[in-house]
């Protein structure tokens, strides 16, 4: 059946059609595509649970004068007919290629109503059994639908999914807490039945694997504040108030909208877009009393890209302070955004409201000392960066120091910026503070150089200032072992049967915590004994 569809699509292109809308399978991913070349049709795919009606409307809205065709299913054609009645789609001049199900088939497979989104499919697959033309193939039969975290909730995914495009390794994974088979709710074997490699093993259990390693690079990345908690800016209140990450996913060609920026409420292309900076940053109420560093630059990038994509778009950036953290190149980029027509306004936002379906951003202009009220189709909140979830537990496991905001402490911010106080544990990126891409790349390269330097040596140099134990005075309480952050203290049994503390000088960092904790005073720090310190005092 797929070959017949390809032949019909080829005929239309040869007859002068500008393009064919259909599904393309590329690098294991199936998605909507506008085929304009004959050789591209080799990648044409038919997927029953992937609707094309919305994508076809977007293509027609973008190129209303082009002569187009589409490879569609009965569900798509019925949906387009309904959308035509609403004035969203024009069928004139549009050629349909595909299979139109009979009313009996439509009723049997429970799709007598137009399917506007993939996720209204019930997963019964009766459409496959009842389609006498064998036009439907089964590709991913997982019935569980979940919000897609990578698309920040703008799309859905299955419980069996590839985490994100270009994932390494580019292999599917299962979400254990929602898989019907793993949770025992249903003896579902949908993914197992269609897996040609037989790679799905339901009986596999979690296991702990221990590996001997020589170095660790801590690169935890960053999280972002949830924009829905900022109701004063309309976050979580109005659907057309989105976060900067959601806008980023919209603008990606591999994103949920195929690179088109739309208003979530109605799918229209926004013409007036307002960016609000420092949402949650430099605000002690959120615990982020620091600058997130990257927001000013990515707002400028978004404004430039929006203007290049649609010259009619007008962007307004309302900022607290406009900061280019990287010197002259970054300042030039901000200037480029202004020359592209972006309006910069230094001020305070009082409220974001909606009237008659139109957003309104009101506040005070600090430079001109007057009130403003800007109408907007779309409001983008530049939410602040924060440490990734679970980093405190990770840092405690690695026994490395971190501050009250859950960022790592460097061994020295100027002289040893990618090292921690622990040997062979290095830092890169947002593990230490909000960091932009150039700085993260530089830190990653520096950390890699330290690791290579470490591995290239036959012997390791250790600091001489380590703790030593006077076994004659040690009581064997081992309180020192409990407080040591580097696990450098073990218990040792002497010939007379006494248990005393023993220092592993390869692990000891000479921090002195064990010296303070030792109640009998049996532990001393080389170079900092009482006699040496008193001698220095007497010399002074």
Image (tube, grey):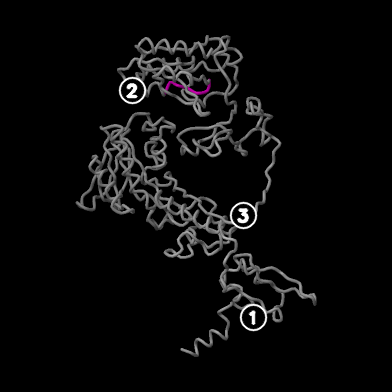
Question: Does residue 168 appear to the left or right of 474 in the view shown?
Answer: left
Relative to 123, residue 454 above or below: below
Residue 78 is labelled as none
- Badge 2: few (under 14), some or many (20 or more) residues near its Cα, within 10 Å? some
Q: Quadrant of the N terminus?
A: top right
Mark 2 lies on residue: 61
Please report the residue visible at 21 percent of the width from the left and 53 percent of the height from the top: 367
The magenta segment is 48-54
Q: From mark 2 to mark 3, how far is it between C-alphas? A: 56 Å
**Residue at the left extreme, as displayed:** 368
Residues 422 and 455: in front is 455
Please report the residue visible at 57 percent of the width from the left and 86 percent of the height from the top: 531
Mark 1 lies on residue: 521
Please report the residue visible at 66 percent of the width from the left and 71 percent of the height from the top: 503
Question: Does residue 53 appear to the left or right of 65 in the view shown?
Answer: right
**Residue at the bottom extreme, as displayed:** 538
Question: Residue 299, percent across and down?
Answer: 33, 44
Residues 428 and 105: in front is 428
Mark 3 lies on residue: 213
Relative to 201, residue 389 above or below: below
Question: Residue 162, percent across and down?
Answer: 54, 35
**Residue 51 lies within the magenta run:** yes
Q: Earlier in the sequence, mark 1 or mark 2?
A: 2
Q: Earlier in the sequence, mark 2 or mark 3?
A: 2
Please report the residue visible at 53 percent of the width from the left and 20 percent of the height from the top: 48
């Amino acid at each position: 059946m797929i070959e017949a569809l390809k032949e019909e699509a080829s005929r239309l292109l040869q007859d002068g059609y500008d393009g064919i809308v259909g599904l393309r399978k590329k690098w294991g991913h199936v998605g909507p595509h506008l085929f304009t070349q004959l050789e591209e049709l080799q990648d044409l795919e038919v997927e029953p649970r992937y609707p094309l009606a919305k994508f076809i409307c977007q293509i027609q809205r973008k190129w209303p004068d082009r002569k187009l065709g589409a490879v569609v299913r009965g569900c798509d054609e019925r949906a387009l007919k309904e959308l035509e009645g609403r004035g969203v789609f024009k069928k004139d001049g549009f050629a349909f290629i595909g299979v139109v199900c009979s009313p009996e088939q439509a009723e049997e497979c429970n799709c007598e109503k137009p399917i506007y989104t993939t996720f209204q499919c019930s997963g019964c697959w009766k459409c496959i059994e009842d389609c006498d033309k064998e036009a439907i193939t089964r590709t991913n039969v997982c019935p569980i639908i979940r919000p897609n975290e990578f698309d920040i909730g703008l799309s859905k995914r299955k419980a069996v999914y590839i985490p994100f495009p270009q994932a390494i390794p580019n292999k599917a994974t299962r979400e254990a807490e929602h898989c019907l088979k793993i949770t025992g709710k249903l003896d579902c074997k949908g993914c197992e039945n269609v897996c040609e490699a037989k790679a799905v093993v339901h009986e596999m259990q979690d296991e702990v694997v221990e590996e001997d390693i020589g170095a660790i690079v801590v690169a935890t990345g960053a999280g972002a504040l949830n924009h829905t908690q900022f109701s004063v800016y309309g976050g979580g209140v109005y659907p057309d108030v989105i976060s900067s990450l959601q806008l980023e996913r919209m603008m990606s060609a591999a994103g949920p909208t195929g690179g088109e920026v739309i208003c979530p409420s109605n799918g229209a292309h926004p013409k007036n877009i307002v960016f609000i900076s420092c949402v949650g940053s430099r605000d002690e109420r959120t615990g982020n009393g620091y600058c997130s560093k990257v927001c000013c630059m990515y707002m400028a990038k978004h404004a430039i890209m929006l203007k290049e994509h649609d010259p009619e778009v007008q962007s307004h950036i309302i900022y607290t302070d406009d900061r280019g953290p990287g010197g002259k190149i970054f300042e030039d980029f901000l200037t480029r955004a202004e020359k592209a027509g972006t309006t910069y306004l230094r001020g305070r936002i009082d409220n974001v409201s909606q009237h008659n379906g139109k957003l309104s951003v009101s506040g005070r202009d600090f430079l001109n000392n007057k009130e403003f009220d800007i109408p907007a189709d779309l409001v983008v909140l530049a939410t602040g960066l924060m440490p990734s979830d679970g980093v405190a537990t990770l840092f405690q496991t690695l026994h490395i120091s971190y501050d009250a905001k859950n960022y790592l402490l460097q061994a020295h911010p100027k002289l040893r910026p990618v090292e921690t106080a622990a040997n062979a544990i290095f830092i890169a990126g947002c593990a230490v503070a909000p960091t932009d891409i150039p700085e993260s790349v530089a830190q990653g390269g520096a950390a890699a150089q330290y690791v290579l330097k470490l591995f290239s040596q036959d012997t390791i140099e250790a600091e001489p200032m380590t703790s030593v134990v006077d076994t004659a005075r040690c009581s064997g309480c081992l309180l020192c072992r409990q407080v040591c952050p580097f696990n450098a203290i073990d218990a040792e049994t002497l010939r007379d049967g006494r248990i005393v503390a023993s220092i592993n000088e390869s692990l000891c960092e000479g921090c002195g915590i064990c010296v303070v904790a030792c109640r009998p005073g049996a532990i001393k720090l080389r170079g900092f004994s009482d006699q040496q310190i008193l001698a220095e005092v007497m010399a002074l």
